[in-house]
Amino acid sequence: MSISTSPPAPVVMTGAGSTELSRSEPPIIVFEKVTKIYANGQAAIRDASFTVRPRDFVFVVGASGAGKSTVIRLLIREERATQGHVLVEGQDLARLKHRHLPRLRRKMGIVFQDFKLLPNLTVEQNVAFAIQVTDPGRPHLKEKVGEALYIVGLEDKLSAFPTELSGGEQQRVAIARALVHRPRIFLADEPTGNLDPDAGWGIVQLLQQINHRGATVVMATHNREVVDLCRRRVLAIEDGRIVRDEAEGAYLRDGDAIL
Amino acid sequence: MNPIPALKFVGRVALQNILRNRGIALASVLTITLTLLGAGVAVVVVHALDGVLHTEESQASVLKVFMADHVGFASEVNLEQTLGHQAAVAKATFENKDQAAQQAGSSLGLTQAINLLEKSGAGNPLPASLNFHLRNIKAVSELNREVRTSALLDSGPHPTDYNADVIPRLERYIFVAQLGGGLVVGVVGAVALVIITISVRTAAYVRRQEIEIMKLVGATDWFVRWPFVVEGVIVGVISALVASVILLGVGVGFGGGHSLALGVGVRFAALIVLCLIVAGGALGSVGSFVGVRRSLGT
Ligand SMILES: Nc1ncnc2c1ncn2[C@@H]1O[C@H](COP(=O)(O)OP(=O)(O)O)[C@@H](O)[C@H]1O
Ligand SMILES: [Mg+2]
């Protein structure tokens, strides 16, 4: 739907233009006075409110332990908000029944710092796995897997095993796997955390490309270089609080960055 | 969702699980085999004991109804037919005075005394009787109550006779044997269930990464759970087959190579094998269901 292998329409080719277009649409993600307190009493998110429009690209930045991963976990309903509401496409995740969780997850592509590939499956099998365990009868499985691997530039590594790939390539396989359901929302939690700067930059460019193809991207990171180079929307978290929300921000407050 | 590729997937993952965790699978087959063997032996022993008790019971389940001397043959036949047609009555036989004398003579050693009485002109003192063989030991006292109202009965102090004392004792034995067997089967079943649950939990732990990814990409609980359930059923059924082979082997061994020991017939043996397979499959599926629940986070 939003992501397709056919050439995207010109209007979604430019990131800046898409932001203009999405102003009139309802937000795809809403955090409404969200507080998350873990079972051990640790408050990870405190009274956080923000919205994300369709086709936005958002960096969630902050020091380690600030609460970035908790934002991602709340979005995929791995955790529930202790207070407030998290809405995805207008759906309040607090009211989402357990049996409807798969439907939510299939709308989303999710990647992590540690790739989460299955070591005993090939690249092709790893990507196919996402279809086999959700919709094993889906026709043209091989073609769909091929398409996803083509988008991430790994069409020539189909039968390689994850251990035979570089970190950047492994993350691309994870991204391809996240793409097979053609997600409208793409979530990445420190996707460059285990990568050297070049490979990391490649992954961020790939995420921007996915964004240009129409997906909303939320990327949690503490990779300052990447954030500063991209000049996309920045949501800064400190100790669970949203302290800054800038449309074309840097990792640090612009004033601080000069120092 | 198309069921056929889904089933293929489930079957393939289940087999992969078993092969990948051969050690755990083997250990569970071993323990479940042992527990099923325990249950099988318990069932066979209870069955054999039950057989012995039933023989005893059928021998004890005889109600002797003594007839008054004046009663004619037609009335006796009439009584025999009305009572003999009841469902609880397996067989009714008539024992005339001479047979009664012979019986008493041979079993009690009273031949001389009876001969003496006959010679003295008093005649044969033993009454004729109708003997009702009942299917069920409990029916004896009921039939006894019913028959005592008949006018055809001997007027002596004991117009009927049955083994009143042996009946409750036999009933108690049967009850204890069944209770004991049931207890063994229950305990053994619970142990097997715990073992399967633990082994599936271990298998789920080994596969936690796969399960995590499945949930992440939006697989339903069905897809996470069913390979484990199928795995449990496979392990349970294999265990049941191994236990059956051992049980039959031992049975034939003790039976002298031609028949099974303890008077177990072919039909009963087949029934046991079937029950073990069903029990193994049920244990496997229930254990897996419980074992995988933690991984699903429901
Ligand atoms: N499962 C959990 N149980 C308890 N505390 C947690 C859990 N996950 C995270 N935390 C705590 O919540 C805070 C935010 O964590 P996290 O969202 O992982 O931060 P970040 O991703 O920005 O490093 C930290 O103090 C962390 O220790
Ligand atoms: Mg984190």
Image (cartoon, coloured by chain):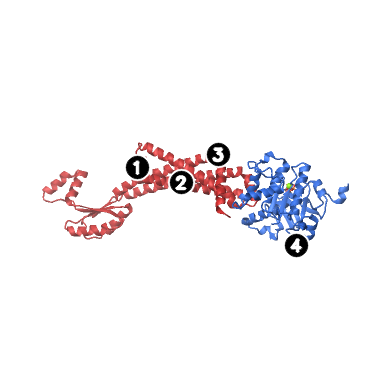
Which of pointers 2 and 3 lies earlier in the amino acid sequence? 3
Q: Callout 3: few (<14), some (14-19), or many (20+) C-alpha neighbours within 10 Å?
A: few
* Subunit ID for the residue under disc 1: B
State which mark lies toward you, 4 or 3.
4
Look at label 2 and name its amino acid.
Answer: Ile
Q: Quadrant of residue A1?
A: bottom right
Q: Is residue A223 above or below residue B253?
A: below
| 10 Å crowding of disc 4: few (<14), some (14-19), many (20+) | few
- In the image, B227: left or right of B117? right
Dot 3 falls on a residue whose secondary structure is: helix
Chain letter, colour blue: A
Question: Label 1 is placed on what type of residue?
Answer: Gly
Which residue occupies 13% across, 46% down? B116
Are the residues flagged by discs 4 and 1 from a single subunit? no
Q: Can you identify the residue that label 4 sits on?
A: A25
Please give the name of the residue rendered at 40% of the width and 45% of the height, measured from the top-left corner. B270
Q: Secondary structure at mark 2?
A: helix
Q: Position of residue B214 (x, y in %)?
A: 63, 49
Q: On the picture, is B27 further left or further right than A85?
A: left
Discs 4 and 2 carry the same chain letter: no
Distance of mark 4 from mark 2, alpha carbons? 60 Å
**Chain B appears what colour?**
red
Residue type highlighted by circle 3 = Arg
Which residue position holds label 2?
B277
What residue is disc 1 on? B263
Q: Earlier in the sequence, mark 1 or mark 3?
A: 3
The answer to which image quadrant residue A50 occupies is: bottom right
Does residue A67 appear in the picture of this structure? no
Q: Within 8 Å: ligand 1 and the Cβ of disc 3?
A: no
Residue that badge 3 annotates:
B22
Mark closest to the chain's N terminus, 2 or 1: 1
